[in-house]
Amino acid sequence: MSMGWKFGKPLKEKVMSLEEPGKFLPFDADRGLVDEVMAKFDIKSVVESVKGKDENAVREAMERLGREVMKLTIELADSKYLDRTGEMVEKVAKQTGISFSHRLERYVELALLASRPTDRWNIAKATTKELVLQVSACSVQKALEEAGIRGLPCKGLCLASFETAAEKTGDRIKTEMSKTLPQDGVCEFHISV
């Protein structure tokens, strides 16, 4: 008994292949990415340059740093240091039409690794509607604190980097910070679409 179902093309013809035989791409971030980003952006130098400046100047410097680090990370991650993860994330997004959160998450993770390799962070949640990032050890916040700069002007660095990544991925994001490192022992960012 026919149900009148029409399948059209066989599934094999509808789905993009996720492998390209003979093309080597590692799954992990290349150490060269970290080296290039760290060579261009020295957190301690940036902190020294804002020492003694007012709150607005420090916040603006942190935001500028966040944008610049993310722009360089994206440029390098999508060209010179393209890895298997990046290739797969882009292919799956193209195939499914779903960009968030995985494309944005890739850039955020790479920017954290490349600019702050000693920081401790965790992706607590990643769905097509929400990304939750927790930072439990932050070299930027520590450097600011050691320089006598109080508060969390480094929040601007994170928020600006997320916005820059979202501009690249085309995701319209809303970001909230529900916890802070000094008060809660973790900075927790909820990024949603």
Image (spheres, grey):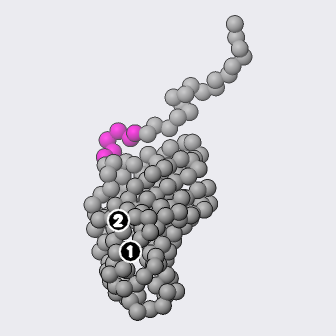
- Residue 30 in picture, x, y percent from top left: 30, 57
Which of the pair 97/144 is nearer the observer? 144
Residue 37, horizontal then vertical, whole percent: 34, 70
63 relative to 164, above or below: below
- Give the main secondary structure, helix, strand or loop, of the magenta stretch: loop
Crowding at mark 2 (Cα within 10 Å: few <14, some 14-19, many 20+): some
Res 45 quadrant in image = bottom left
**Residue 90 appears in the picture as rendered:** no
Q: Determine the residue positioned at 60% across, 27% down.
A: 9
- Quadrant hosting residue 19: top left
Identify residue for label 2: 137
Dot 2: element: strand
Quick one: quadrant of the N terminus? Answer: top right
- Provide the residue span drawn in magenta: 19-24
With 114 as the anchor, is 167 left or right in this view? right
Between 13 and 142, the one nearer to me in the picture: 142
